[in-house]
Image: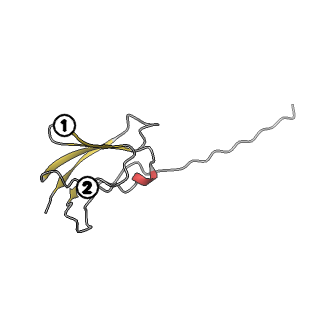
């Protein structure tokens, strides 16, 4: 009929594997003092939950701004759940652990 149409599509790839350190030493020396998630700034709708070995929530932030320095906790192993985009993919999360060593 002489009609035509065009469209375009942009695809942006994002690395969904967050790099989370496995050791935190909040002793004020500026090295590993906070739980630093490398791509947290790329995901404005992220969420972080930190738990102890019994599953009690110790820290929760949405969005997480790379500012958690657990100075009030004893040395040991702690666990985290990190949701890169809790709005669009609420069931997608990464889980892991980190060791905490104080002074």
> Residue 61: image x %, image y %?
34, 44
Q: Which disc, if any, is residue 55? A: 1
> Residue 95: image x %, image y %?
28, 43
Q: Nearer the viewer, residue 61 or 5?
A: 61
- In this view of the protein, can residue 74 be seen by the observer? yes
Q: Nearer the viewer, residue 43 or 1?
A: 43
The residue at 25%/61% (across/down) is: 33
Q: Nearer the viewer, residue 33 or 39?
A: 33
Cα distance in 3D space between marks 2 and 1 = 19 Å
Residue extending farthest to the top is 1
> Residue 58: image x %, image y %?
22, 43
Q: Is disc 2 in contact with disc 1, using a CB cutoff of under 8 Å?
A: no
The residue at 40%/46% (across/down) is: 63
Q: Which residue is mark 2?
A: 69
At label 1, counting other C-alpha atoms closer than 10 Å, the crowd grade (few under 14, some 14-19, many 20 or more) is few
Asked whether, in this view, residue 73 is left or right of residue 88, the answer is left
Q: Earlier in the sequence, mark 2 or mark 1?
A: 1
């Amino acid at each position: 009929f002489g009609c035509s149409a065009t469209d375009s599509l942009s695809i942006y790839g994002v690395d969904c594997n967050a790099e989370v350190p496995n050791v935190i030493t909040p002793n004020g020396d500026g090295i590993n003092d906070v739980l630093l998630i490398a791509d947290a700034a790329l995901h404005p709708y992220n969420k972080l939950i930190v738990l102890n070995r019994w599953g009690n929530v110790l820290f929760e932030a949405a969005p997480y701004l790379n500012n958690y320095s657990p100075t009030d906790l004893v040395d040991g192993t702690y666990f985290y759940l990190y949701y890169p985009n809790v709005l669009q993919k609420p069931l997608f999360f990464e889980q892991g652990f980190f060791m905490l060593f104080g002074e």
